[in-house]
Image: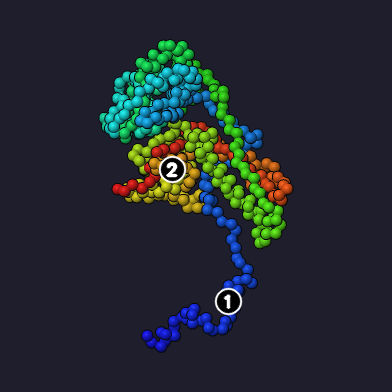
Amino acid sequence: MSTAAHRQQPEQPEQQAGRAQLSLGIAAARNLATTTKTAPQMQGVSSRWLLRTLPWVEVKGGTYRVNRRLVYEVGDGRVTFVQEGSAVKVVPAELGELPLLRGFDDAEALRALAERCRQEEYEPGQVIAERGRTVDHVYLIAHGKVEKVGSGKYGRETRRGVLADGGFFGGRAVAETPGTWEFTARAMTACTVLALPRTAYEEVAGRNERLRAHVSKRQAEQDRPQNKKGEADIALASGHTGVPVIPGTFVDYELSPREYELSVAQTVLRVHSRVADLYNEPMDQIEQQLRLTIEALRERQESELVNNPEFGLLHNADHSQRISTHSGPPTPDDMDELLSMRRGTKAFFAHPRAVSAFARECNKRGLSFDSADVGGHAVPAWRGVPILPCGKIPVSEEGTSSILAMRLGEAEEGVVGLRQTGIPDEYEPGLNVRFMGINDQALISYLVSTYYSAAVLVPDALGVLENAEVFHTPS
């Protein structure tokens, strides 16, 4: 090794040990230096696009009533099952989701119908019901996917929809005149189905006058003139000549419109008086505690707006606005179908994993996302509609999630957020911080509360793409 190279080698600690210290050490110098600090950081903060995007409506009375035109066609919800080993049974009260049984509350009759449902297993491709034949069964899908297939104008097979867990078809099997199947129902995957034969219904109805009267009344309501959305029809005349008799009409309203009460998320923030008195420089301790607490409350608020069983968007989407993916992962075809179900869709909301899964499907087809500007941020878009991430939308253990599509605002009869501003001790819109005093342990307490809800003004304002597989599967 050369002499120059030898001089460049750093001295080892044992070589420095015998030498006198020539300058102040770094460790000692730091005792006199001012440390630059950040405000407390928090991993749990998300972009909260849903809270930022929803148009907020003032609810001064704490309750928001959604008045609608009278709708005859209700029901068509989801059916819940219980499983005992390999045996599956329908919860009797859930049969009230069938359109003609909606509102029927005779527990004994519903239990008798549930007991007469027989479990059937179908393999992929197997036909469950055939187009043109008499509707003689109600089919309840406990597990799996079923496609509804029809015939196009030129004889080609067309898919008219996909039903999955909790769905059902053949509800008119309990009607006085059940009619015929308008489609062929075929299993897309292995399916577990509960079938209620019409003969079993007739057996129960023959002993229960209330059941027969209820079904007859519900069928009469559904047979009244109505538009394609199920609303009571408004009689009009057009294209006439001469002096015909012009029909008279009126617009009927729902007698019991839905009311949304503001929900609340709260916590009590406690700070010791010694901390507030002595350790307030350079950052206000109470202010930082409040900031982080409010961030957590806003995260909970967004989660509730998505998942709350009373007003959460996932639970309040109408059954007619729910579709399942045609294969597994969300594809451009699925997103187009979801988009076509309503006018004026303003935004998609999806878990980041669902956005990634959709991107993979686009890549396979050689397609790419559009881009949209939302509040100065460039975000991915499909057909010009922004796709906004929302980590509050759950991903199941099986790797499936949902994608929301919504129209927004009161003026558009869309989805709105609900809150009340101007409340006492307001700290942010719809959120207040109230001083609760100091206890005998010198703890200062503040009650932090936020009030909120969400409303879907008409059913087609909100749509859901369900059962979207988001985990990556090797090709």
Q: Assign the N terminus to one quadrant of the image.
A: bottom left
**Quadrant of the rendered structure where residue 113 is?**
top left
Q: How crowded is mark 1: few (under 14 residues within 10 Å), some or many (20 or more)?
A: few
Count of marks, rendered view? 2
Asked if the residue at tag 1 contacts the one at tag 2, i.e. Cβ–Cβ closer than 8 Å, the answer is no
* Residue 245 in the image, given as x and y percentages of width and height: 49, 16
- Side (left or right) of 425 relative to 104: right
Taking the image as drawn, is residue 172 in sight? no
SS for tag 2? loop
Residue drawn 31% across the image and 29% down it? 121
Q: Residues within 10 Å of mark 2 (few under 14, many from 20)?
A: some
Query: With respect to residue 109, does 44 lie above or below?
Result: below
Say the numbered circle drawn on residue 395: 2
Q: Distance between the residues labelled 2 and 1?
A: 54 Å
- Side (left or right) of 32 relative to 330: right
Residue drawn 59% across the image and 57% down it? 40
Please name the amino acid that badge 1 sits on: Gly
**Quadrant of the rendered structure where residue 38 is?**
bottom right
**Quadrant of the rendered structure where residue 165 is?**
top left
* Residue 324 in the image, given as x and y percentages of width and height: 39, 36
Identify residue for label 1: 25
Which tag, 2 or 1, sits closer to the chain's start?
A: 1
Residue drawn 50% across the image and 49% down it? 374
* Residue 465 in the image, given as x and y percentages of width and height: 42, 38
Please name the amino acid that badge 2 sits on: Val
